Amino acid sequence: MKDYRSTEEKYEYSPIMEEVYSEMLKRKRDNRTREGIETGKEPDGKTPFFDIFINHREKPYPIKLAMGIVESWMVTEPTMHDKEVLVGFPRPMRPIHEHFSIGLCRERHVLNHPSYADRKEELNALMTAMRPEFHPDEGKAAAALEESMFCTEEFPNANQLLWGALWHTGGYQGHTVPNYDILLTRGVGDVLRETRQRLAKETEEKKILMYKACEIILQGFGDWIKLQATAADKKAEDESDPVLKKRYLNAAQNCRDIAFDAPKTYYQAAQLTFFYNLWDANDCTGRTDQYLYPFFEKAVKEDRAFAEEVTASLMMKFYEHGVHNITVGGIIPETGEDAANDLTFLMLQILRRNHATHPRMSIRVNEKSDPRMLALAVQMWSEGMSDPTVASDSTIIPAFINNYGVEPKDAMNYSLLGCQELEIPGKSNFGCEDGVFNLAKVLEYTLNNGMDRYDNKAVLGLPLGKITDYETFDDLWNAFEKQIVFLTKRFCELCDVGQQIRAANYAKLVKTPFTEACLERGLNLDDGGAYYGYGCVETAGSSVTADSLTAIKKLVYDEKLISRHTLEAALAANFEGYEKERQLLLNRAPKFGNDNEEADEMAQRVLKLFWTEIKKYKSIRGMEYSGACSLLSGGLHYGEHTWASADGRFAGEPLGNSIGPRPGADTNGLTAMLNSVSKLPLDLGVGGTTCNIVIPTSTTSTPEMRKNIEDMIYTFLNNGGQLGQITTANLDDLVDAKAHPELHSDLIIRIGGFSIKFIELAEDEQDEIISRYSA
């Protein structure tokens, strides 16, 4: 029996699973596609949402939505691939589909598929005509509110300068983790019975509609599971090999057994987990090693080989369809003891064997953690992987309890989701995210009398003056603080209106019955149904803002090496003709990320100001906003719309995609960078605040080196760090991969929250990664 807790052991597929894996690789879509939902079969020409909404126009929207979701699955042909143990496959992409981010989505590109050729014009016209029916709230109120805040008769389109430059409001991803514990311990049928009991007693029309919609979803989900048995039955009928025939018959019986009843075996629990994850658009599955472990523990005593095969099958499905995040390790809430178990290590070893970008995995680390878990993670990084992400229990759990009032047992049960946001699984909706706010743009307004330098006309912030008007640094800081207060209020108001869109659109209807308190309250998950309803604000440009303020304080006000008028001229000219001043700003002023007290204190001050300010506001889900920073490639895009900054950065250059320093700013080594990050007020950033950690492969080549990395990461996580996402490569490899992509198909990197093969990145994203290694 292999000891998967050892880095020396490697998981190997059985011969039959090796065949299954090879066939899966032939079907698997590229990384970008798996980050979305188009991992199913080719479009099939069917129109379930159109059919339901046209044939039942008299019914309320939530009922039609629920009926449409169920119909979209029921008209999809049940699928089981050769020699597999798990049944199920995603729906084909169709012109209308639903997603937990916003509700119903219109996908006009699907109409170009041959299966829709005969109805393309008709469906295109219907898509436009029926738009109000598909979207009860299209965001007109949000647009009107933003116009009233910023547009004037002189500048009627001023608000167009905000989107993607200063902020993004109203949410865009919407990840949450449903309660898989409830699904597996109670089963679909028991939750359906509770829904019907609550419906029978309810008198409020809004809640009646919510219960009816959930009833339709649950009944439809169970019926659909039964239907999946036919795929396995067909396989068994056509199979002559008695071993495979039995395999298929068992799969079919599983489907019938778990359609409405709770699973009794690990095989059944894994199948039901996968089925529900399909309906949940392959979103995050939370602490999978915890809720599946009681089933797994029993299964390995009966047939270890098959238990491992089921685990491999589930992980393979999660790989093929791009599950966004799985959390393992951590603490057992009931005892406070280490939660890592044999399933934890087996799942990590399978991910290691696949050397894959999906499923993304995260490990929770604490002082009681089995040290072999972090050692295995370091081993995986040394082999070129960027998973797993590491999360600090010692930072996150007290922050949830002390700053946000989360009950200790729930705080100890937190999980990661999406691209490293944090949540209480099955019990919360933290927005993920309610919006993005670019601090560097706020400073741009502060130094330019409230105006965007790309426009220099419309006043978007407060007209408090230019850098030339601030006699002291305190004057400048006070003006910056006033801009933060002014813009944060408007930002949170717009985020709330945006979240009302999700609530009206029932975006998370499939998640709702399996999220605690939704049925009790009679509210959908986006409408305040979840037990915890905090807000989450992704924060862009914090290091650029802090370094700019540090440079101004030191070079303009303290040392007087650059005058205020000269700095104004240099910024306005994007440093053209002011290279001497730019070099002073770049090299004489200290930068965050180098364990420098002056620079680090400014970074703390900037984040504490903003994250304390947003905490004054509550989301429509009823609880305070929290800070976060996991920007995907947002640091690139917000940088494109942010003018030259006083840290020496040119207009349009990247801001950075994590809470760490701007690429190239940290020059004192990795330990110094981690020390700087660990000083930040991350207890206010429980939305999920990740740090990009670059580890050259040359530093991981021996056991002693890997142990040093392990100790460094452990120290970071237990001394104030929150989340770390890893990229291991060498600069030469990255440069060569850009020039010769065909030679580097297995080079995996991390970009602001998700893993991807380097060669699948756009050129500007490749350049941003290379810049991290060029410091």
Image (spheres, rainbow, N blue to C red):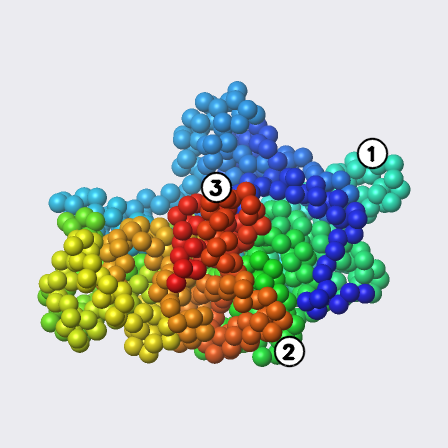
Q: Are marks 2 and 1 in contact (CB under 8 Å)?
A: no
- First in sequence: mark 2 or mark 3? 3
Q: Are marks 2 and 3 in contact (CB under 8 Å)?
A: no
Foreground pick, 86 / 497: 86
Q: Residue at x 75, y 44 (%)?
A: 19
- Residue 609 location (% of width, % of height): 30, 71
Q: CA distance from mark 2 to mark 1?
A: 50 Å
Question: Which numbered circle lies on residue 238?
Answer: 1
Q: Secondary structure at mark 1?
A: helix
Residue that lies at the very extreme toward the top in this rendered image: 118
How far across and how far down the image is residue 324, in percent?
A: 55, 54
Q: How many other residues sit within 10 Å of disc 1, few (<14), some (14-19) or many (≥20)?
A: few
Q: Secondary structure at mark 2?
A: loop
Marks 1 and 3, the one that precedes in the sequence:
3
Q: Are marks 1 and 3 in contact (CB under 8 Å)?
A: no
Identify the residue at horizontal 44%, vertical 27% (top origin).
Answer: 124
Q: Which residue in the protein does label 2 denote?
A: 337
- Cα separation, mark 2 vs mark 3, equals 43 Å
* Residue located at (55% from left, 52% from top): 747
Nearest the viewer among 378 and 114 is 378
* In front: label 1 or label 3: 1
Q: Amino acid at mark 3?
A: Leu
Residue at the right extreme of this rendering:
242
State the image coordinates of residue 126 (x, y, percent, origin top left): 44, 28
